[in-house]
């Protein structure tokens, strides 16, 4: 029973110090976070508050200087297919077409050709790119590239999807469309998502829970459960009340000194 209630991701008193030009830069201090399976969590905060650092620790790209970073209760010691990362710049292989980009993970793990074919077909269908399966990244729009990046992570059996401002470089209309599509994919697959954004509106629209971070060094200040029904109406008074409250909290961080 304990196993069923264990968080998929847990950070306990996590700190991270980088060395830069001979100086120690404290990026995170005393971060504690528990993520339950199936949750959609957004991290918000000013630039330099440690959002991306926290994500990279969860991915296993960086090691914590102190504290514990655990997946299903086991220490994360490096990258693994159970944790997939989606970046703002897509990170696609330019020499592979859409089909082969999505199939790269299963192929590199030695899966049977028939299984790879079925997996790729499933996720191409999920992100609506059936007509573009044989197209190369340079022939795709930004929104399509990001759909491929998401499908590639899902095809690699990721249980936890880590997203670092994935829609930040897109125009407003494409961003809104992909937000809708991401919520649909999340609801259909039961994925767990940890999503970094600078946009308060995006966080409220997407998240079950919004985690607010403050800089100098990076700390987790507060967490808020967003109790709005889905699909969410960004014009509703309830949505705007959340926007006002979170905006006020973020603005209160400005001018804070390191300590």
Image (cartoon, rainbow, N blue to C red):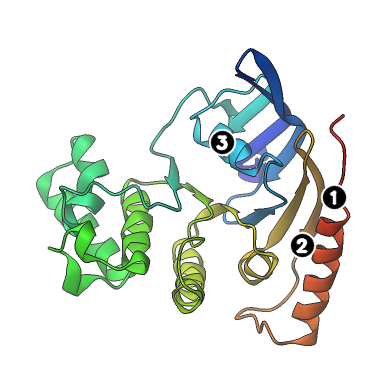
Res 215 → quadrant: top right
Give the structural element (helix, strand or loop) at label 3.
helix
Tell which of 242 and 228 is nearer to you: 242
Locate residue 2: give its quadrant.
top right
**x, y percent for residue 243:** 77, 72
Quick one: SS at disc 1?
A: loop
In the image, which disc is placed on residue 97? none
Question: Looking at the rendered structure, which numbered label has been put on residue 253?
Answer: 1
The residue depicted at 53 percent of the width and 26 percent of the height is: 62
Residue at 31% across, 59% down: 148
Q: Is the Cβ of the residue at disc 3 closer than 8 Å to that at disc 1? A: no
The local crowd at label 1, few if under 14, some if 14 to 19, many if 20 or more residues have their Cα within 10 Å, is some
- C-alpha gap between disc 2 and disc 3: 21 Å
Residue 172 visible from this viewpoint: yes
Q: Which residue is mark 2?
A: 225
Camera-near label (3 vs 1) is: 1
Report whether residue 66 is seen: no
User: Which mark lies nearer to you, 1 or 2?
Assistant: 1
Tell me if residue 64 comes above or below residue 238 in the rendering: above
Residue positioned most to the top? 22
Disc 2 is placed on an element classified as strand
For the point 34% across and 47% down, which residue is it?
Answer: 91
CA–CA distance in space, label 3 to label 1? 25 Å
Q: Which residue is mark 3?
A: 58
Give the distance between the C-alpha atoms of the residues marked 1 and 2, in whole angstroms. 20 Å
Identify the image quadrant of the N terminus.
top right
N-terminal-most mark, 2 or 3: 3
Task: Residue 84: give x, y in percent of width and height.
Answer: 43, 44
> Relative to residue 120, is residue 158 depicted above or below?
above
| Mark 1 or mark 2, earlier in chain | 2
Q: Residue at x 56, y 36 (%)?
A: 58
* Label 1 close to label 2 by CB (< 8 Å): no
């Amino acid at each position: 029973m304990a196993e069923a209630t264990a968080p998929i991701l847990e950070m306990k008193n996590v700190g991270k110090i980088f060395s830069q030009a001979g100086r120690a830069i404290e990026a995170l201090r005393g971060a504690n976070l528990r993520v339950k399976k199936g949750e959609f969590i957004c991290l918000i905060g000013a630039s330099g508050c440690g959002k991306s650092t926290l994500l990279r620790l969860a991915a296993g790209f960086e090691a914590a200087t102190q504290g514990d970073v655990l997946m299903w209760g086991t220490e994360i010691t490096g990258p693994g297919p159970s944790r997939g990362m989606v970046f703002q710049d897509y990170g696609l292989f330019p020499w592979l077409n859409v089909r082969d980009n999505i199939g790269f993970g299963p192929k590199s793990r030695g899966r049977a050709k028939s299984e790879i074919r079925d997996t790729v077909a499933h996720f191409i269908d999920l992100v609506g790119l059936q007509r573009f399966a044989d197209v190369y990244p340079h022939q795709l729009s930004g929104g399509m590239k990001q759909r491929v990046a998401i499908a590639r992570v899902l095809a690699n059996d990721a249980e936890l999807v880590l997203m670092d401002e994935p829609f930040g470089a897109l125009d407003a209309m494409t961003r809104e469309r992909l937000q809708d599509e991401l919520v649909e994919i999340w609801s259909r697959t039961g994925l767990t998502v940890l999503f970094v954004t600078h946009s308060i509106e995006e966080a409220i629209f997407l998240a079950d829970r919004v985690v607010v971070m403050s800089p100098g060094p990076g700390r987790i200040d507060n967490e808020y459960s967003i109790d709005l029904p889905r699909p969410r109406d960004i014009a509703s008074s309830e949505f705007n009340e959340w926007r006002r409250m979170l905006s006020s909290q973020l603005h209160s961080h400005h001018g804070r000194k390191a300590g």
